[in-house]
Amino acid sequence: MAISLYDAFVPSCQQILAGLKGVLAKGEAFAAEKGIEPAELLEAKLADDMWNLPWHVRSCWMHSAYAIERLDVGNFTPDFTVLPEGFDGMRALIDEAQAKLSDVTADQLEAVAEKPIGFVMGGKTLMTLTGQNMLLSFNQPNFYFHATTFYDILRMKGVPLGKMDFMGPVRIMT
């Protein structure tokens, strides 16, 4: 059985975003329980030249809901304009991504699967991909990278997390 672009992208993003929201909640609770200032977690990075926690939430939003919006426009330009502030801001951005993904249809994605999409940065088109390849070979790997890095930062800071926290609600047979 063939898998649609929708099936390959949207449910997995929704699953990991749900996990990300749970990881965020555990991080916030850990900070409160241990008397850790929220800024200690919010500003944490894996390395000096990497982004902090809010950037990774922003990137998960960007490489899921925002990426789908950009398919209709015909280009994907990273949006680094506004970082979520604090735990509430990160939670709100995850909720926004989940809501936007809930509105996406399989027909909507199939309509842009072969459409050329330019990756634009600094006003220049650096590469052109089909909508399908943009989502599956550019946005999806970026999405997982940033979700994993978010998890790793909190784990590094001592938040008791496991693989199932990252994975979110697995899609089981009903």
Image (cartoon, rainbow, N blue to C red):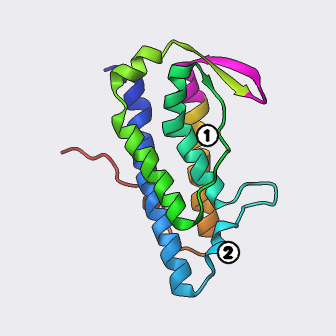
Between 14 and 84, the one nearer to me in the picture: 84
Give the residue displayed 58% in from the left and 66% down from the top.
86
Give the residue displayed 47% in from the left and 17% down from the top.
112
Instruction: Say which quadrant the N terminus sits in.
Output: top left
The first of marks 2 and 1 along the sequence is 2
**Residue 4 circle label:** none
One can see residue 40 in this view: yes
Check the image and report above or below for 68 versus 31.
above
Check the image and report above or below for 102 versus 52.
above
Residue at mark 1 = 142
Name which quarter of the figure residue 123 lies in. Answer: top right
| Residue 4 point in image, percent of width and height | 37, 23
Q: Position of 60 compared to 102: left or right?
A: right
Q: Which residues are magenta?
A: 121-137
Query: Callout 2: helix, strand or loop?
Result: helix
Q: Residues within 10 Å of mark 1 (few under 14, many from 20)?
A: some
| Residue 102 point in image, percent of width and height | 35, 39
Q: Position of 29 compared to 173: left or right?
A: right
Residue at mark 2 = 40
Check the image and report above or below for 127 versus 23.
above
Instruction: Say which quadrant the C terminus sits in.
Output: top left
Query: Callout 1: helix, strand or loop?
Result: helix
Give the residue displayed 46% in from the left and 68% down from the top.
25
One can see residue 160 in this view: no
Q: Check disc 1 and give the amino acid type.
A: Asn
| Residue 52 point in image, percent of width and height | 69, 59
| Residue 23 point in image, percent of width and height | 48, 64
Between 36 and 12, the one nearer to me in the picture: 36
Q: Check disc 2 and give the amino acid type.
A: Glu
Furthest toward the right, the residue is 48
Q: Was residue 75 drawn as part of the magenta stretch in this picture?
A: no
